[in-house]
């Protein structure tokens, strides 16, 4: 997996999350972060190893669990980028009792340490600034540590960096202890759990060229109760449709490499299966709207949240084609007798 994809994913997730205010609740760190194994494995390279080291009697903390996951993902991706030849990430959490810290409150110390390049002082001083990045254009947006910083402060905690050129980096978060008991079922923003026993709402053919975005969206669809088949291009989608696979709705990105984009795909699908529900999505929904409107196809603007996706899919399943205002018959007002 290349760096560009990873930072793209981080950006995407940031965009997802930024639309919600923080919702603190009691969180069991070892369960919440332990549940991110698969996501971390997918987001890092094979030569980057992750060690989890949590105190056994670790206190719960009072934070937004989804944002905590985003913090860990942002820090892990930064560590990966700082270790081009591979290395180790240690995620450690331990209790910091009131008597041991200046604030005289109970905290939990959560640190993420890597064996990477480290930072020179002039970089270290600026890393929390939004949009500050040393990465090439397209590889970093400079928002990762700004999110981590915002999370620590808004949670009533703090953040520190220890980093030296050639000696790796350690990010230290101090987060407030919760005096409540965490819910038994942790909720993951990033890793949606398949609802194994839920009845399926139908089969979605997901057309998305980016592997990471595809697996994220697939997890959202599964969480909503859909079965998912993924195609990495418009051509592959047409292949999947023609080989008799059961598809109840096509959900396609508009921007895709290759000769056919999502709108071209929609046109072709309409020709072959005029009744098949179809939903497009784009980060530039306005630009695509005219073409999609002409076909009677709805466009879900990116970024979207789980609920937006749920509503949009229900909409197209109910009314596969959308009559946009321009093509809709003008309303008829009846006035007077015989009208
Ligand atoms: N673990 C680390 N080791 C070395 N340098 C780091 C580390 N983490 C961050 N940095 C430096 O801090 C800068 C800012 O990091 P930040 O996560 O905010 O943005 P980014 O990684 O460049 O982009 P984004 O996270 O939005 O994809 C990075 O460009 C990098 O120079
Ligand atoms: Mg980053």
Image (spheres, rainbow, N blue to C red):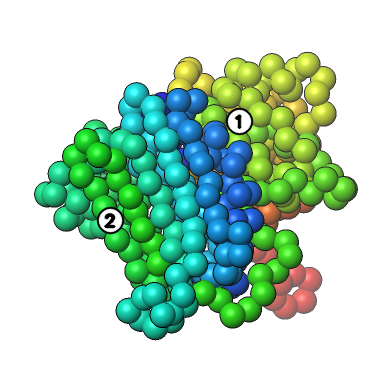
The residue at label 1 has a CB less than 8 Å from ligand 1: no
**In the image, which is nearer the foreground, mark 1 or mark 2?**
2
**Is 255 in front, or is 42?**
42
Query: In the rendering, at what x and y percent does residue 248 appear?
Result: 78, 36
Query: In the rendering, at what x and y percent does residue 290 appear?
Result: 48, 42
Q: Up-down: is 110 above or below 296?
A: below
Q: Which mark is residue 161?
A: 2
Could you tell me which secondary element the residue under label 2 belongs to? Answer: strand
Residue plotted at (33% across, 63% down): 159
Q: Up-down: is 273 above or below 285?
A: above
Figure quadrant of residue 23: bottom right
Residue extending farthest bottom: 104
**Is 48 in front, or is 333?**
48
**Is 175 in front, or is 57?**
57
Q: Which residue is mark 1?
A: 207
Figure quadrant of residue 78: top left
Residue plotted at (48% across, 33% down): 49
Residue plotted at (63% across, 78% down): 180
Residue extending farthest left: 122
Query: In the rendering, at what x and y percent does residue 124 appear?
Result: 19, 51
**Is 221 in front, or is 53?**
53
Q: Up-down: is 137 above or below 164?
A: above
Residue plotted at (59% across, 80% down): 179
Q: Is residue 68 left or right of residue 207?
A: left
Q: Is residue 297 visible?
A: no
Earlier in the chain: of badge 1 and badge 2, it is 2
């Amino acid at each position: 997996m290349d760096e560009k994809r990873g930072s793209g994913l981080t950006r995407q997730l940031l965009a997802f999350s930024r639309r919600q205010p923080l919702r603190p609740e009691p969180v069991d760190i070892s369960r919440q972060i332990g549940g991110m194994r698969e996501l971390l494995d997918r987001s890092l390279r094979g030569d980057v190893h992750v060690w989890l080291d949590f105190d056994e009697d670790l206190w719960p903390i009072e934070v937004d669990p989804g944002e905590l996951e985003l913090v860990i993902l942002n820090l892990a991706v930064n560590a990966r980028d700082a270790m081009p030849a591979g290395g180790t990430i240690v995620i450690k959490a331990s209790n910091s009792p009131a008597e041991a810290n200046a604030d005289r409150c109970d905290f939990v110390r959560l640190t993420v340490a890597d064996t990477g390049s480290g930072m020179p002082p002039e970089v270290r001083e600026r890393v929390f600034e939004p949009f500050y990045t040393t990465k090439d254009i397209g590889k970093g947006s400079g928002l990762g540590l700004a999110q981590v910083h915002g999370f620590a402060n808004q949670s009533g905690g703090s953040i520190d960096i220890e980093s030296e050129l050639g000696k790796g980096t350690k990010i230290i978060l101090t987060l407030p202890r919760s005096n409540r008991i965490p819910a038994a079922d942790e909720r993951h923003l990033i890793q949606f759990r398949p609802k194994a026993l839920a009845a399926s709402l139908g089969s979605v053919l997901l057309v998305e060229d980016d592997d990471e975005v595809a697996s994220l969206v697939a997890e959202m669809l599964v969480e909503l109760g859909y079965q998912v088949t993924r195609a990495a291009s418009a051509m592959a989608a047409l292949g999947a449709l023609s080989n008799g696979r059961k598809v109840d709705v096509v959900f396609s990105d508009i921007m895709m490499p290759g000769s056919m984009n999502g709108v071209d795909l929609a046109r072709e699908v309409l020709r072959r299966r005029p009744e098949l529900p179809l939903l497009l999505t784009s980060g530039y929904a306005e630009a695509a709207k005219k073409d999609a409107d002409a076909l009677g196809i709805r466009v879900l603007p990116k970024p979207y949240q789980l609920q937006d996706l749920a509503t949009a899919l229900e909409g197209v399943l109910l009314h596969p084609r959308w009559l946009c205002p321009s093509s809709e018959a003008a309303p008829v007002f009846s006035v007077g007798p015989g009208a």
